[in-house]
């Protein structure tokens, strides 16, 4: 399944999933029978890899989502989408989540006027995210901003390209989270055992 981990390459014909949609090797095209546990585990691994998390971090997010009011699976995805590196990716400052994480770690961004270099920082609604003055000439950020129209910007974030800033207008809603489509109920079932 396409996870869009390679940035712009996933939006072209060179994407490996588009060219060969089966496992590598001699037996890659064989029939595989997967159990319920295997399906649940695969979904959890897919979400973890998409957001670039380790097991301990992911488990902590699940515990926090379980304590919140509402549907646990949707709460989990909202918490993951509120991460600073994910917001940087959604605003179009980076072409992939890994690149967004790297840019945040290098200290290119400020939240409400203060420099933040922690990718897991939870952005709240109406927090203003801006690119530092020194970082506005970085080539890969400008290239990503130019190519963001191919990927699209969700309706729950707002970008001001002239000032190199943006903000999260509202909390993300499950219906507006487009790529990739997750079955978060499988993750809840896996952790509920």
Image (spheres, rainbow, N blue to C red):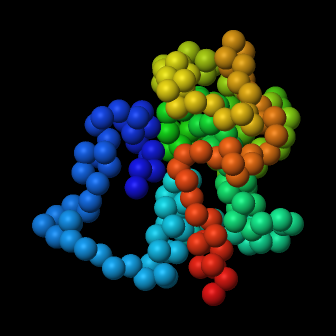
The answer to whether 113 appears left or right of 164 in the picture is: right
The answer to whether 54 appears left or right of 192 in the picture is: left
Q: Quadrant of the C terminus?
A: bottom right
Name which quarter of the figure residue 115 lies in. top right
Residue 38, position in %: x, y?
45, 78
Q: Is residue 25 above or below residue 13?
A: below
At horizontal 21% and vertical 66% (from top left) the residue drawn is: 28
The answer to whether 78 appears left or right of 23 in the picture is: right
Name which quarter of the figure residue 14 lies in. top left
Residue 82, position in %: x, y?
72, 48
Residue 4, position in %: x, y?
45, 45
Q: Residue furthest left?
A: 26
At horizontal 39% and vertical 39% (from top left) the residue drawn is: 10
The answer to whether one can see residue 141 in this image is no
Residue 157, position in %: x, y?
73, 33
Q: Is residue 4 above or below residue 165?
A: below
Give the camera-side residue of 176 and 121. 176
Q: Quadrant of the N terminus?
A: bottom left
At horizontal 75% and vertical 37% (from top left) the residue drawn is: 156
Q: Residue furthest top?
A: 162
At horizontal 54% and vertical 61% (from top left) the residue drawn is: 48
């Amino acid at each position: 399944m396409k996870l869009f981990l390679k940035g712009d390459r996933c939006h072209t014909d060179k994407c490996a999933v588009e060219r060969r949609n089966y496992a590598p090797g001699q037996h890659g095209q064989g029939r595989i029978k997967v159990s319920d546990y295997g399906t649940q585990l695969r979904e959890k691994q897919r979400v973890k890899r998409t957001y670039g998390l380790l097991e301990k971090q992911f488990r902590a997010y699940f515990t926090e989502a379980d304590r919140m009011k509402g549907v646990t699976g949707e709460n989990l995805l909202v918490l993951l989408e509120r991460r600073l590196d994910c917001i940087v990716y959604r605003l179009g400052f980076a072409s992939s989540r890994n690149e967004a994480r790297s840019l945040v770690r290098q200290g290119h961004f400020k939240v409400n006027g203060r420099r933040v270099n922690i990718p897991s920082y939870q952005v709240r609604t109406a927090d203003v995210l801006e690119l530092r003055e020194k970082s506005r000439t970085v080539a890969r950020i400008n290239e990503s901003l130019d190519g963001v129209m191919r990927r699209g910007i969700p309706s729950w974030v707002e970008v001001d390209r002239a000032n190199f800033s943006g903000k999260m207008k509202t909390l993300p809603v499950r219906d507006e989270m487009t790529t990739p489509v997750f079955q978060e109920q499988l993750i809840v079932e896996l952790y509920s055992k």
